[in-house]
Amino acid sequence: MIRKIGIIGCGTIGSELALAIDSGKVENASLIALFDILNINAIQLKSKLQNSNPSVFSDFLEFVSSTSFLQADIIVEAASQEAVRNFSKKLLDGGKNLLIMSVGALSDYEFLSELIRSASKNFGYIYLPTGAIAGIDAIRSVKDVLESVTLTTTKTPKALADAPFFKVNNINPNKISKKTLLYDGDAANAVNNFPANINVAAILSLAGLGIKKTSVKIIADPEIEVNQHEILAKGVFGEIMIKVRNVPSTRNPKTSFLAVLSAIECLRSACNNQMRIGT
Ligand SMILES: NC(=O)c1ccc[n+]([C@@H]2O[C@H](COP(=O)([O-])OP(=O)(O)OC[C@H]3O[C@@H](n4cnc5c(N)ncnc54)[C@H](O)[C@@H]3O)[C@@H](O)[C@H]2O)c1
């Protein structure tokens, strides 16, 4: 069965996904709609496609009242946390399956419960890709016997510089000249201090112990050339140690190439009705 796909957000991840569908890298998928608040981004993306002819939208109400929306099986959000907050419920209420990239928006568990209720009522499904880390399948497996889980993220001071943490603590990120532990606390507080890092902490928290019991360390290292995430999980099952060293995507240095690939693989899995590997 061919699954009809709509994409919200035609930036780094949305574009790579659209190109993957267009070139046949995602089997059983057909791209039928592109939506972006910046119309030009959707138009430019459409112009790069060779085999698909999606309708283009920049107004959400117009999108949800269109024939394309009616026909769509899966809507991919690759836009922003705000887009997740504003659109997800309406998409699920409309009976759509939803693949969410801006997972950070789901650290509000009341909002997440609302989405799950809506998906359940309308026979929809919410897909959350592993994104910029790995091993979420293992963390899910040991969830009931998990005693502790710590995420240690190491980035250059420049990559972290936008974080509110620096203003609040009156620290100049440009003056960090050696490897420095900036934050050591729970994921809930990390969200406020380093919101750009929240997607990784959020998916780990959802899979494991929740946002208050997941520990997060943020390290600034002027020498590191990649975005590094390490997970250490402990329990009666033993220990799980995961380390990824992510190269940034060429288009958006804040988005790891792995996150782009993870989005494509998640969609592939959602469109493959025969077999799921490692889930
Ligand atoms: N889960 C993960 O591990 C992971 C990893 C990387 C990025 N992300 C998240 O995925 C999202 C997309 O990342 P990206 O690198 O493609 O970003 P990007 O900035 O390259 O592209 C985002 C696109 O979405 C559009 N957009 C923004 N807000 C919108 C809205 N409310 N409605 C419609 N369109 C909107 C923008 O105009 C832009 O074209 C971001 O929220 C990012 O934080 C998640």
Image (cartoon, rainbow, N blue to C red):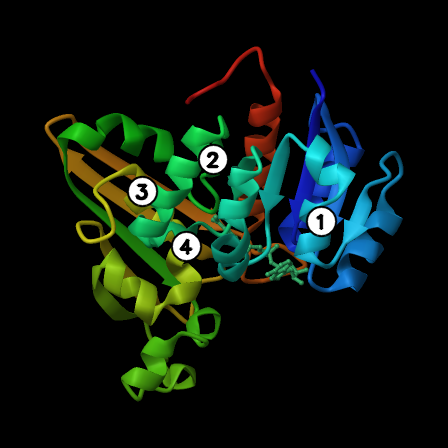
Residue type at mark 2 is: Ile
Please name which of the two marks, 4 or 1, marks the residue nearer to the observer. Answer: 1
Task: Say left or right for 154 vs 6.
Answer: left
**Residue type marked 4:** Gly
Ligand 1 within 8 angstroms of badge 4 C-beta: yes
- Residue shown at 88% from the left, 50% from the top: 47
CA gap between label 3 and label 4 equals 10 Å
* Structural distance between the alpha carbons of marks 3 and 2: 13 Å
Residue 235 on image: x %, y % = 13, 33
- Residue type marked 1: Phe
Q: In the image, which is nearer the foreground, mark 2 or mark 4?
A: 2
Front in this rendered view, residue 238 or 142? 142
**Where 40 falls versus 200 (above or below)?**
below
Where, by quadrant of the figure, is residue 59 drawn?
bottom right
Q: Residue at label 3?
A: 206
Pinpoint residue 27: horizontal percent, then vertical percent. Answer: 70, 22
Determine which residue is flagged by label 4: 104
Q: Which mark is residue 126?
A: 2
Secondary structure beneath label 1: helix
Give the alpha-carbon distance from disc 2 to disc 4, as whole Å.
14 Å
- Earlier along the polypeptide chain: callout 3 or callout 2? 2
Q: Secondary structure at mark 3?
A: helix
Label 2 environment density (alpha carbons within 10 Å; few <14, some 14–19, many ≥20): some
- Identify the disc placed on residue 162: none
